[in-house]
Image: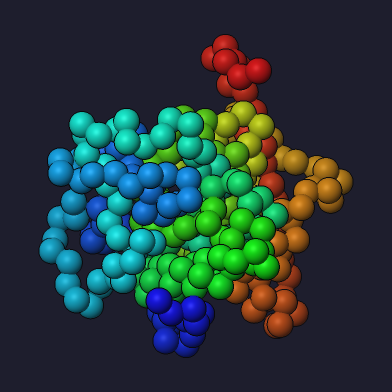
Amino acid sequence: MTTKLPRKRFYRQRAHANPFSDHQLDYPVCPSQMDWSKHYPKYYAPVETDNIAIVPSKRPHSPATSVSADALTAACTVPVDNFSKTSEDAPKVEFADLGCGYGGLLVGLAPIFPETLMLGMEIRVKVQDYVAKRIHALRIQNSGPEGVTGGYQNISIIRMNAMKFLPNFFEKGQLSKLFFLFPDPHFKKKKHKARIISPTLLAEYAYVLREGGIIYTITDVKALHEWMVKHLTAHPLFELIPEEELATDPVIPHVRESTEEGKKVARNEGDKFLACFRRVADPLVPSTQA
């Protein structure tokens, strides 16, 4: 098994992908049918896959869009009659980086929250393949006692269109943090419907985010920052977190600096516009959380 980190120059791709295109994606029909053992083998025992319960892609996979078949990039499904194979006591994914790019945030946060499972979702084939191999190499390099805390066993990546299939992976109130870091600005007005922050999608984010959970947004495009703040502020289940409160959040430095896009903006001495929102209780629904 190779321990070398992949070289990014061999995995270059377009900066963004059309979320409305018919991408070749397989996804579970519901969160309980997702096999996380191939992503987090330290926490989940392997499951059998005799009776697959997934929604397959509509078109056959072509060699041009295939990904490596190691534990991080294999199709992840679970048989209908074998749910008990996945431990009920195993931790669930709590952090999700939607449009995770080259995985800088995941790698930066992994040692800080070594027992918190984090998942990156990335729609671009080559970029997802790069991150999968990066994590695979980091796990091998840090498998010994001198490795970083957690050994990067708590992070993983999946090729997925988060704008379409997020509720297929996460239960209601499962996530504690959602990240939208330097998303596609879709400058043209007719393309605004493709922005990852929109009134419709905010309802889904509120569904998968627990009360007290946080949405982190950052961009170098002021107009997009204003758009995201406008729609998040207008949503009844989110409230803006004051800057002074964010000063003590250990995640913020990584939101600003750990991603490849954030580093590029810093090199070019560009502006970074940060806004974070807390998920508040639904006033119309009695709270079940302590």
Q: Residue furthest top?
A: 286
Q: Residue furthest bottom?
A: 9
Q: Nearer the viewer, residue 97 or 93?
A: 93
* Left or right for 243, reference 101: right
* Left or right for 259, reference 64: right
* Total residue callouts: 0
Q: Nearer the viewer, residue 94 or 181?
A: 94
Is residue 47 in view from this perspective?
yes
Residue 226, compared with residue 63, is above or below; it is: above
| Residue at x 23%, y 77% (from the top left corner) | 64
Q: Nearer the viewer, residue 31 or 178?
A: 31
For residue 24, what is the image quadrant? Answer: bottom left
For the N terminus, the quadrant is bottom left
For the C terminus, the quadrant is top right
Is residue 200 in view from this perspective?
no
Q: Residue furthest right?
A: 244
Q: Nearer the viewer, residue 196 or 3?
A: 3
Rendered location of residue 61, percent (x, y): 17, 66
| Residue at x 72%, y 77% (from the top left corner) | 266
Rendered location of residue 82, percent (x, y): 25, 34
Coloration of the structure image = rainbow
| Residue at x 29%, y 33% (from the top left corner) | 83
Rendered location of residue 198, percent (x, y): 49, 46
* Left or right for 178, reference 146: left
Rendered location of residue 211, percent (x, y): 62, 29
For residue 58, what is the image quadrant? Answer: bottom left
| Residue at x 15%, y 41% (from the top left corner) | 51
Residue 282, compared with residue 220, is above or below; it is: above
